[in-house]
Amino acid sequence: MRIVLVGPPGAGKGTQAAFLAKNLSIPHISTGDLFRANISQNTELGQRAKAFMDAGDLVPDEITIGMAKDRMEQPDAANGFLLDGFPRNVSQAEALDAMLTDAGMKLDAVLDLEVEEDEVVKRIAGRRICRNDSAHVFHVSYAPPKTDGVCDTCGGELYQRGDDSEGTVRNRLEVYHTQTEPIIDYYKAQGLLRTISALGDVQDVTQRAMDALKK
Ligand code: ADP
């Protein structure tokens, strides 16, 4: 299956993507994780992306699209993938369509995780992520780790993403409304959209997502 996940920052895309990718045996491709890996390895791409990410702005398409395409062309993605954080505007969605058409492929579904803005702000403000694996996500009040600052799953160090600070979150939400939300209509018009509520237990959301994808 080829699936795109959409939803505002803090909707739980990363968390759900990790479970869904495992259930469906397809790789989880997160452009945010790819950028963060490039930044921590100090690659040229990482250096170019960093200022945009720190400000909560989109990294320009000429950087993002090539990086996403390279990743989708890896052998493990030949039979499907779950995209998390890409496409994030209509021109990226069009580039993805063109890329898939060229390869004789198409998307199977676009899963839209719905959650209201107040909840998103609360989730992001308390979010802590493991340095070893961004799918190991905790929250200071909703899902606290057993030991402060330590990942329950692997013992890694938990940290707060720089772009999870309050000022940056406001801009990321603004960017989501103006640039990313239009892709929801784009995919609705193609009959691919499946919208589910991202509220409640992580497992319940995963179940809702699996049910929506089976339809
Ligand atoms: P979240 O979904 O919580 O906002 P991500 O890890 O998906 O977090 O993305 C973090 C940042 O990485 C974004 O705010 C943006 O700067 C950059 N980024 C990720 N994916 C894209 C993309 N497809 N196009 C442009 N920028 C992106």
Image (spheres, rainbow, N blue to C red):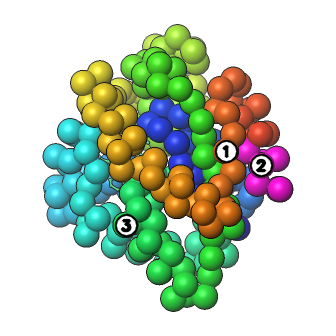
Q: Which mark is residue 212?
A: 2
Crowding around mark 2 (Cα neighbors within 10 Å: few <14, some 14 to 19, many 20+) is some
The image quadrant that residue 158 belongs to is top left
Q: Is residue 125 left or right of residue 49?
A: right
Determine the image quadrant of residue 60.
bottom left
Outermost residue on the top side: it is: 141
Q: Is residue 141 left or right of residue 124?
A: right
User: Is residue 214 within the magenta segment?
Assistant: yes
Quadrant of residue 190 within the rendered picture: bottom right
Where does residue 98 sit, x and y in percent of width and height?
47, 80
- Crowding at mark 3 (Cα within 10 Å: few <14, some 14-19, many 20+): some
**What percent of the width, then of the height, locates residue 55?**
20, 39
Part of the protein shown in magenta: 209-215
Q: Is residue 212 left or right of residue 32?
A: right
**In this picture, residue 99 sits left or right of residue 200:** left
Looking at the rendered structure, the number of numbered marks drawn on it comes to 3
Q: Say if mark 2 contacts mark 1, CB within 8 Å.
A: yes
State which tag comes first along the sequence, 2 or 1. 1
Q: Which residue is identified by label 3?
A: 91
Amino acid, disc 3 = Ser
| Vertical comparison of 106 with 24: above or below | below
The quarter of the picture where the N terminus appears is bottom right
Q: Residues within 10 Å of mark 1 (few under 14, many from 20)?
A: some
- Along the viewing direction, whichever of 52 and 172 lies nearer the viewer: 172
